[in-house]
Amino acid sequence: MKLTVTLPRHRYDLTIGAGVLANVGQWVSSLWQPQRVMVITDETVQQLYAEQVLKALRQAGFTADAFAVPAGETSKSLTQAEELYDWLASQGMTRKDGIIALGGGVVGDLTGFVASTFMRGLHFLQIPTTLLAQVDSSIGGKTAVNTASAKNLVGTFAQPDGVLIDTETLKTLEPRRVREGIAEIVKSAAIADIALWTKLSGLKDEHELLENAEEIIAACCKVKRRVVEEDEFDTGQRLILNFGHTIGHGIENTAGYGVVTHGEAVAIGMVQISRVAESKGLMPLGTTAQLSEMLLKFNLPITTEYWSEEAIFKALTHDKKTAGSDIRIILLEKIGQAKIVTIATDEMKEFLIRQL
Ligand SMILES: NC(=O)c1ccc[n+]([C@@H]2O[C@H](COP(=O)([O-])OP(=O)(O)OC[C@H]3O[C@@H](n4cnc5c(N)ncnc54)[C@H](O)[C@@H]3O)[C@@H](O)[C@H]2O)c1
Ligand SMILES: O=C(O)C(=O)C[C@@H](O)[C@H](O)[C@H](O)COP(=O)(O)O
Ligand SMILES: [Zn+2]
C-alpha cells in the first residue's frame, strides 16, 4: 500500500507492506541517483537487517556503507550526532549523496537530525523497524536529540524523501517494544480516529493486534499524514500528536533516558493528565477509565515508580508547547477527538499531584 504525504514544499510516499524490504534497492533507485548512500542503524538492527540492505544497495549500483550506534535512547545525543558527522565526513559525503535511517525511533530521530544539519542538509530516507517508528516517528519530519535538561530539546523539522515500512520486521521485535508502539497507536485512535479505537477495542491482546498490523499501521499513518499536512511545523493542530507527552517526556527525563520507554511514558502521561482534567470537568466522565482499560489490556503501565511532581514539573518547563507563562495541554473532547487547552504553567503543577 502506498500513502502520499503532500506538503507545500515536499511530497513523499509511505510504502507499507509485508516483505517490502526485499525491494529496497529498487525503492532507493526510484528516488535517488546519488554516488553514496550511508546507512545509519543501531547495533541490534545492524545484526538483523543491515547486511541485506547494504547488499541490495550495492547491487543497485550505490556506494554504500553503514554505521551502527549503540541501541537505546541514550544514543539520541549531541555526542552521538558529532560522531556521525565525523564518520560522514570521513566517507566523503557531499550534498548530492543520501542517508538512510534503518531502525527504530531513536535511529530515525538521530539520523534525521544529523542528515538535516550535516552540510546544512542532506536528503534522507526512513526505514522504520519498530512498531512505534512505523506508526509515528518515521513520518512527519520531527527530528531530535535529548539533552540532560529535556527530552527532544534540540532538533529540526526535516522531511524524508520516502518511508519504507516492512511489517515483517516486527517479527523480531521484543514484546516490550511492541507494547510501546501500541501506546502511540492508542494515542492516535484517542485523538483522531474513533474507527481505529473501535477496532482496538475488539482486539484481545497485542498478538491479535500484530495479526492486523498492516491495517492498523496504515490507519495511524493516515492520522499522522492528515495532521502533518494541516500543520507541518507544529504551530497549531499538530500539537494534538503530543497527547500524553508533556508528562511522558518529564517521566523519561527524570527516570533517566531509556529506563521507562517512550511508549510507556506516553501511556502513563495520557492517563495521568486525563484523570485530573476529568476531575476538573475538562474531559467527559469515564474517559480516563476507557483509556486505562485499553492500555492495561495491552499490558502497558498507567502509573510509575518514577513519579516526582517537582522533578517532572522542572523537566516539562522545557516543553515546546509552553509559551510565556502558559502551556498548551492536549486533552480529549471525547474518545476519537482531541482538544488543545491553554492553562497557566503554574496550574500544570496541579496536573502532577498524586497519581491514580
Ligand atoms: N519524530 C517523531 O515524530 C517521534 C514520534 C514518536 C517517538 N519518537 C521517538 O522515538 C524513540 C522511540 O523509538 P523506538 O520505540 O522505536 O525505540 P528504539 O529506536 O530505541 O528501538 C527500540 C529497540 O528495538 C530494537 N529494534 C529496532 N528494530 C528492531 C527489530 N525489527 N527487531 C528487533 N529489535 C529491533 C532497537 O535496537 C532498540 O533496542 C524515542 O526517542 C521517541 O522520542 C519520535
Ligand atoms: O509528530 C509529532 O508532532 C509528535 O508530537 C509525535 C510524538 O509522538 C513524538 O514523540 C514527538 O517526537 C514529540 O516531539 P516533541 O515536539 O514533543 O519533542
Ligand atoms: Zn511520541
Image (spheres, helix red, strand yellow):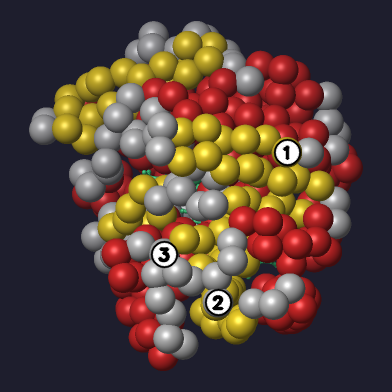
Q: Name the residue nearer the viewer: 40 or 348.
A: 40
What amino acid type should be assigned to the residue bearing mark 2?
Gln
The tag on residue 35 is 2
Quote the CA–CA distance across marks 1 and 2.
Answer: 27 Å
- Mark 2 secondary-structure assignment: loop
In the rendered image, the quadrant that contains the N terminus is top right
Q: Nearer the viewer, mark 3 or mark 2?
A: 2
Which class describes the residues within 10 Å of circle 2: few (<14), some (14-19), or many (20+)? some
The tag on residue 122 is 3
Quote the CA–CA distance across marks 3 and 2.
Answer: 13 Å
- The residue identified by callout 1 is 2
Q: Position of residue 18 (x, y in %)?
A: 85, 51
Any atom of ligand 1 within 8 Å of the CB at mark 3? no
Q: Nearer the viewer, mark 1 or mark 2?
A: 2
Q: Position of residue 19 (x, y in %)?
A: 85, 57
Q: Is residue 269 left or right of residue 202?
A: left
Residue 234 figure quarter: top left
**In the rendered image, the vertical position of residue 310 relative to residue 21, given as above or below:** above
**In the rendered image, the vertical position of residue 355 relative to residue 176, given as above or below:** above
Q: Is residue 171 left or right of residue 254?
A: right
Name the residue at 52% across, 32% down. Answer: 6
Any atom of ligand 1 within 8 Å of the CB at mark 2? no
- Mark 3 secondary-structure assignment: loop
The reply to whether residue 302 is in sight is no
Quote the CA–CA distance across marks 1 and 3.
Answer: 24 Å
